[in-house]
C-alpha cells in the first residue's frame, strides 16, 4: 500500500513566508479550467428579468457580464498576488437559467503555459456574477451570489472534474 503525503500549501517559502511559485522548470502544456458562479434572485426579480429579456436601464445584463468577466480573466494576475501573468488563448462564457430563480455563469479559460488557469476561470465567473448583481441591485439587494466553484481543470499534474 502506497502512503500519500498531505498536500502542501505551495505559496510559502522554506521560512513560511509568502512566495510566488517558480514555474520556470515546468514544460509549457495546454491547460484549461472551467468555473461557475450562481446568482439567485428573489422570485419577483427573476420574473421581471425574464419578462424584460435580461435587459436593464444600464443595458444588456448578460452581455455586460460577459465583457466584465473577460476583462477580469485577463487581469487576474493584477488582482491575486501570486498569480502569474498568462497568455490567454481563449475565454468562453455560458449563462443559463437553472430553474426559475437561479442564473448559472460558467467561464472556461484556455492557455498553453507552465501553470494553470483555475484562478482566471474563477475570477471570470465571479466578476461576471458581480456585474449581474451591480446591474440588478436597483431591483433588489436580496440577490445572492454563490456558490462559486471550480468545475474542471485539465493539464498540469492532475485533471479535476469533467472536461471543460
Image (tube, rainbow, N blue to C red):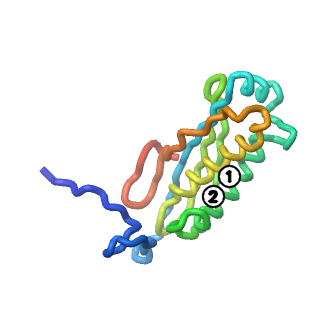
Q: Is residue 6 left or right of residue 47?
A: left
Give the number of callouts: 2
For image coordinates 77% across by 27% down, the residue present is 50
Q: Are marks 2 and 1 in contact (CB under 8 Å)?
A: yes
Which image quarter: residue 46? top right
Q: Is residue 108 above or below residue 13?
A: above
Q: Is residue 117 above or below residue 133?
A: below
Q: Which mark is residue 136?
A: none
- For label 2, the crowd category at 10 Å Cα-Cα, with few meaning under 14, some 14 to 19 and many 20 or more, is many
Q: Position of residue 47 (x, y in %)?
A: 75, 23
For image coordinates 68% across by 55% down, the residue present is 70
For image coordinates 47% across by 65% down, the residue present is 115
Q: Is residue 140 left or right of residue 55?
A: left
Q: Pointer 1: what residue?
A: 69
Q: Is residue 50 above or below residue 105?
A: above
Q: Is residue 74 left or right of residue 30?
A: right
Q: Is residue 26 above or below residue 30?
A: below
Name the residue furthest right: 57
Q: Position of residue 92 (x, y in %)?
A: 64, 49
Give the CA separation, mark 2 to mark 1. Answer: 6 Å
Query: What kind of element bears circle 2?
Result: helix
Q: Is residue 82 left or right of residue 131?
A: left
Q: Position of residue 11 (x, y in %)?
A: 41, 67
Query: What kind of element bears circle 1?
Result: helix
Name the residue furthest left: 1
Q: Position of residue 162 (x, y in %)?
A: 46, 42
Q: Which mark is residue 73?
A: 2
Amino acid at each position: 500500500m502506497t502512503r500519500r503525503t498531505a498536500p502542501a500549501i505551495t505559496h510559502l517559502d522554506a521560512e513560511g513566508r509568502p512566495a510566488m511559485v517558480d514555474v520556470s522548470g515546468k514544460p509549457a502544456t495546454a491547460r484549461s479550467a472551467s468555473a461557475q458562479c450562481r446568482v439567485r434572485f428573489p422570485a419577483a426579480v427573476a420574473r421581471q428579468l425574464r419578462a424584460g429579456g435580461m435587459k436593464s436601464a444600464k443595458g444588456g445584463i448578460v452581455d455586460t457580464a460577459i465583457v466584465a468577466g473577460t476583462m477580469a480573466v485577463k487581469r487576474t494576475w493584477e488582482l491575486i498576488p501570486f498569480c502569474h501573468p498568462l497568455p490567454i488563448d481563449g475565454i468562453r462564457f455560458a449563462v443559463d437559467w437553472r430553474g426559475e430563480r437561479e442564473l448559472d455563469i460558467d467561464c472556461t479559460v484556455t492557455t498553453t503555459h507552465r501553470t494553470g488557469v483555475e484562478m482566471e476561470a474563477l475570477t471570470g465567473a465571479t466578476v461576471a456574477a458581480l456585474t449581474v448583481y451591480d446591474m440588478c441591485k436597483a431591483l433588489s439587494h436580496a440577490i445572492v451570489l454563490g456558490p462559486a466553484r471550480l468545475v474542471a481543470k485539465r493539464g498540469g499534474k492532475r485533471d479535476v472534474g469533467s472536461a471543460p
